[in-house]
Image: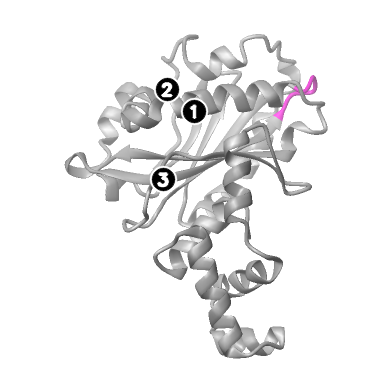
Amino acid sequence: MLLKIAIFSHLKMEHFFDKIFANQKFDISSLDYSGFESQVSFIEKLSQVQNSSVIIYDVFKKEYIYVHLDYAEELGYNPKKGEELGLEYYISLVHPEDFKFVLDTYKKAFSYINELSIREKKDYKLIYSYRTKGKEGKYYSVIDQMVVLELDKKGNVWLLMTISDKLPSNFKFKKANRQLLNTKNNKLYLFEDSIKFKEKAILSAREIEVLGLVSKGYASKIIADKLFLSVHTVNNHRKKILEKIDASNIAEAITYAKNLGFI
């Protein structure tokens, strides 16, 4: 389902993104919407290739200018309510135990990013997991990746892009998790709880290499040949990967590891 919309424009200043960025004074002349339109086809391909939902929020206009909800039908989202209520509808679906956590994550992450230099602001990826209500009141685990897509000339955050994935139905959700990842040095910042999680779940360089090849569709025999390992060793790596990420199967491990920045 693809919606190119301005239906979220009724959201007022009390919206948390608007509060976070309330002090920004935009250089309107540098907001190149024609340039953004030229990126739409790439963004659409990105969502199709990754089978992900993609949402872009315009901080200046205070509205969503691009929404592609890949799993809307699967989760039973109501498009009419989405059009009527906008973000308020989707926020209302967040599990009550995760709601404050998600809003606190936004506040802390972007308070941090707002203090960075212009050249650094686009180097960070906010990754967070939570539960959202779907069909028959059942909750599903999702993981979002949010990045600063565009700045104005002054360095104000203009466009935010969120890539969202529904985790496998058998995923063992323990608690909401968050990370602020610097994509240049692959280090975690700000959230102490996420750093501890990363240290606990971190994969070795070899395990990352194996999982990366598995994600490309290579069988254990081919991976063994490529890495000059025995098939037994490769299979042991796969087993350890599942244990470290606490995944039920390798497909789940790939999805989770990609979104957490392991591969």
Q: Is residue 153 magenta?
A: yes
Q: Secondary structure at mark 1?
A: strand
Q: Which residue is mark 1?
A: 64
Q: CA distance from mark 3 to mark 2?
A: 22 Å
- Residue visible at 47% across and 9% down in the picture: 14
Q: Secondary structure at mark 3?
A: strand
Q: Is residue 142 left or right of residue 37?
A: left
Locate residue 157, reporting x and y percent. 68, 24
**Residue at the left extreme, as displayed:** 136
> Please, what is the three-letter code of the amino acid marked with disc 2?
Phe
Q: Is residue 62 above or below residue 192?
A: above
Q: Is residue 244 above or below residue 145?
A: below
Q: Are marks 1 and 2 in contact (CB under 8 Å)?
A: yes
The mark lying in front, picked from 3 and 1, is 3
Crowding at mark 1 (Cα within 10 Å: few <14, some 14-19, many 20+): many
Task: Give the residues in magenta.
Answer: 151-155
- Residue visible at 58% across and 73% down in the picture: 216
Crowding at mark 2 (Cα within 10 Å: few <14, some 14-19, many 20+): many
Q: Is residue 128 above or below residue 21?
A: below
Locate residue 79, reporting x and y percent. 29, 35
Q: CA distance from mark 1 to mark 2?
A: 6 Å
Label of residue 8 in the image: 2
Crowding at mark 3 (Cα within 10 Å: few <14, some 14-19, many 20+): some
The tally of labels here is 3
Which residue is more in the foreground, 82 or 231? 231
> Please, what is the three-letter code of the amino acid marked with disc 1?
Tyr
